[in-house]
Image (cartoon, grey):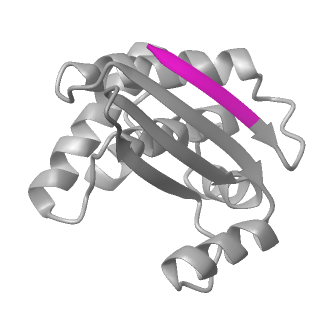
Amino acid sequence: MLQFSVQYAVEVPELSRQKLRAWALQAIKAAHEEVEFEFAELTCRFVDKPEAIELNKTYRQKDYAPNVLTFEYGLDELQTVRGDIIICVPILRTEAHEQHKTFEQHAAHLLVHGVLHSLGYDHIEEEEAQHMEALETHILKKIGFPNPYQDRES
């Protein structure tokens, strides 16, 4: 159901391939109940700020480093979904600290968020955002992490 590759352009010793794959698989399984596909081929790449800025500038015309950037390639004739998930490690670390979350907790949230984007989920419209956030919260709970939006809701 899932082919998952991890690329480390920067060192992230806290995040093993095995752990990341398990998190991605939880997201795939949860989304598979709503999105029709046979197989998913995903790559997650951990980058520094310059690479994140360059990718965001090149593909989104935005001149800053995002926490996560997802390239969704859609569904092919074999019902395979493909996507690339880029996570900027310095932004991940900063946000985790600012949001009083563990590095691992925030990393899981960004990865799950990216996986859902690669499967076609979005948060442009309010209704879509609420659905995507609820699904993320459900997946993270299954993984063993609290609601990532809890502080925002209080």
Q: Nearer the viewer, residue 40 or 61?
A: 40
**Is 140 located above or below residue 131 in the figure?**
above
Task: Give residue 72's position: percent from left, percent from top.
Answer: 42, 51
Q: Say if the magenta span includes residue 3.
A: yes
Magenta residues, dominant SS class: strand
Task: Give residue 3's position: percent from left, percent from top.
Answer: 57, 21
- Identify the image quadrant of residue 14: top right
Q: Nearer the viewer, residue 75 or 101?
A: 75
Q: Say if the magenta span includes residue 65.
A: no
Report the residue at 29% width, 20% height from top. Answer: 30
The answer to whether one can see residue 3 in this image is yes
Q: Nearer the viewer, residue 83 or 134?
A: 83
Task: Give residue 102's position: percent from left, percent from top.
Answer: 65, 37
40 relative position to 102: left or right:
left
- For the magenta stretch, what is the residue range? 1-6
Give the position of the N terminus as an image quadrant.
top left
The answer to whether one can see residue 144 in this image is no
50 relative position to 24: left or right:
right
Report the residue at 31% width, 27% height from top. Answer: 79
